[in-house]
Amino acid sequence: EIRITLGVFAWQITHTRQRSHISDFAGVEQLAADIERAQGAVHGLVVCAAMFQDKFRPGEFPIDLWRKVIDVNINGTFYANRTFGTLMARRGRGAIVNIASTAAYGSQALHAYGPSKAAIFNMTKNLATQ
């Protein structure tokens, strides 16, 4: 079972667990290597990286929160796709599902979350061409 929650990878198979923060590229690569070494090839992945935010006016939006949301939602999704997708492509098989949000299409005071989820739609389309 592979779980991705709030930007954290958690892998649990037969009472073993490994964790890596999705915004840590080296950690994601290590996680993939560990999973494949212990269990064999990964043929499917669901990436549901999500760092949420409260609603703020643009001038009040904390910059450190902006960076965290972007790092988890965009960078983390790319890291997982790059790492696991490369392994799948080498084998000639595999599927990745990226979860975004309807906030990508909305007009709300979600100045980091909404745009980050819109980026996931676009990223997925672009990655699919490979």
Image: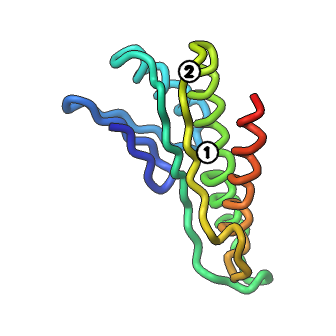
Q: Which residue is situated farthest in the left direction here?
A: 15
Q: Position of residue 1 (x, y in %)?
A: 32, 37
Which quadrant of the view contains residue 50?
A: bottom right
**Please, is residue 91 above or below residue 79 in the view?**
above
Name the residue beneath numbered marker 2: 93
Question: What's under tag 1, amino acid-wise?
Answer: Gly
Q: In the rendered view, does 6 fall on the left or right side of 109?
A: left
Question: What's under tag 2, amino acid-wise?
Answer: Arg
Q: Residue at x 58, y 79 (%)?
A: 54
Q: Position of residue 42 (x, y in %)?
A: 45, 24
Question: Label for residue 76?
Answer: 1
Q: Position of residue 87 (x, y in %)?
A: 58, 19
Q: Which residue is nearer to you in this view: 72 or 1?
A: 1
Which quadrant of the view contains residue 56?
A: bottom right
Q: On the rendered image, what quadrant is the C terminus found in? A: top right
Precedes in sequence: disc 1 or disc 2: 1
Q: Secondary structure at mark 2?
A: loop
**Please, is residue 122 above or below residue 18 in the view?**
below
Q: Position of residue 106 (x, y in %)?
A: 70, 77
Q: Which residue is nearer to you in this view: 86 or 93?
A: 93
Q: In the rendered view, does 85 fall on the left or right side of 105?
A: left
**Marks 1/2: CA–CA distance:** 22 Å
Q: Residue at x 67, y 76 (%)?
A: 110
What colouring does the structure picture have? Answer: rainbow
Q: Residue at x 61, y 34 (%)?
A: 25
Q: Residue at x 53, y 45 (%)?
A: 47
Q: Nearer the viewer, mark 1 or mark 2?
A: 2
Crowd around label 2: few <14 · some 14–19 · many ≥20 (10 Å): few
Crowd around label 1: few <14 · some 14–19 · many ≥20 (10 Å): many
